[in-house]
Image (cartoon, rainbow, N blue to C red):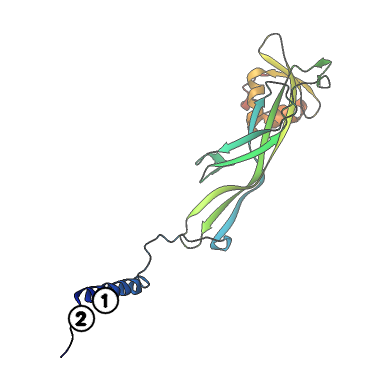
Amino acid sequence: MARSVPRHTTILLNVILTTSLLVYGFQYVPSNRAHVEKLKASDFSYKLLVEDRDLCAYGHIVKDNNTEAYRRATITLKEDDVVAGYSLSKTQSFTKYTKFTGPTIKDKVGETTAQKVAYSFLLTGDIISRTNKKTKQSQTMIVNARITYLRVPYCENPDQNTITFKNKAGEVRTVARSVFMDALSHLSIRTSILIKKSTEGIDHSKTSGNVVD
């Protein structure tokens, strides 16, 4: 006479069988997690648009004489900003650490000791177009960037409207305050005001006739 399997044993066997099938089946179910493709340099093509060009400037006035700590100067260019004739595809920031030193007795403007010091930072680099070979999407961006600066000791004149300073060429110059401030941060007049001698030429259309030599 055949013996029947106890009820609890049957239930246990069914549970084991079901669990085994589920575990076996999950091994062949495709993962639903998003696959992030890692792109390599070889996945892009590159085109050089601008090489080793002055791209933008940034001015800073020293407000104290702290000469010990290095501080960070950051130039940030936002998405869609036009640089050297090209619109950037993304926001980019560039940093330089330096000591912002105030005027010392060695900082002479002619025969006068400078009262204050300004810094004019210059971003130089290349602009490229990078295209994804698969999607054909292109990005315009700055690469190989570096930041240099001019340290410009200066005096505020009694009229409060003009600034006297010694530029990189060693020439003592007096210009309207607005022109001096613009020259710290604008490529259009930075070179002619802060670097060249006045006899080398000034783009008066950019300075609105406010330069006083």
- Residue at the limit of the structure toward the bottom, as seen here: 1
Q: Nearer the viewer, residue 178 or 30?
A: 30
Can residue 14 be seen at all in this image of the molecule? yes
> What's the residue at 80%, 24% (across, down)?
171
Spatial separation of the CA atoms under disc 1 and disc 2: 11 Å
Task: Identify residue type, mark 2.
Answer: Val
Q: Could you tell me residue 44's position as x and y percent?
A: 54, 60
Q: Position of residue 109 (x, y in %)?
A: 80, 19
Viewer-nearest residue: 50 or 156: 156
Towards the viewer: 69 or 62: 69
Q: Quadrant of the C terminus?
A: top right
Mark 1 belongs to which amino acid? Leu
Q: Is residue 29 left or right of residue 103?
A: left
Q: Which mark is residue 13?
A: 1
* Residue of label 2: 5
The nearer-to-camera label among 1 and 2 is: 2
Identified at 74% across, 30% down, the residue is 195
- Quarter-wise, where is residue 197 in the image? top right
* The disc label shown at residue 133, or none: none
Q: Residue 124 at what x, y percent from top left?
A: 67, 42
Describe residue 6's horizontal placement relative to residue 130 as left or right: left
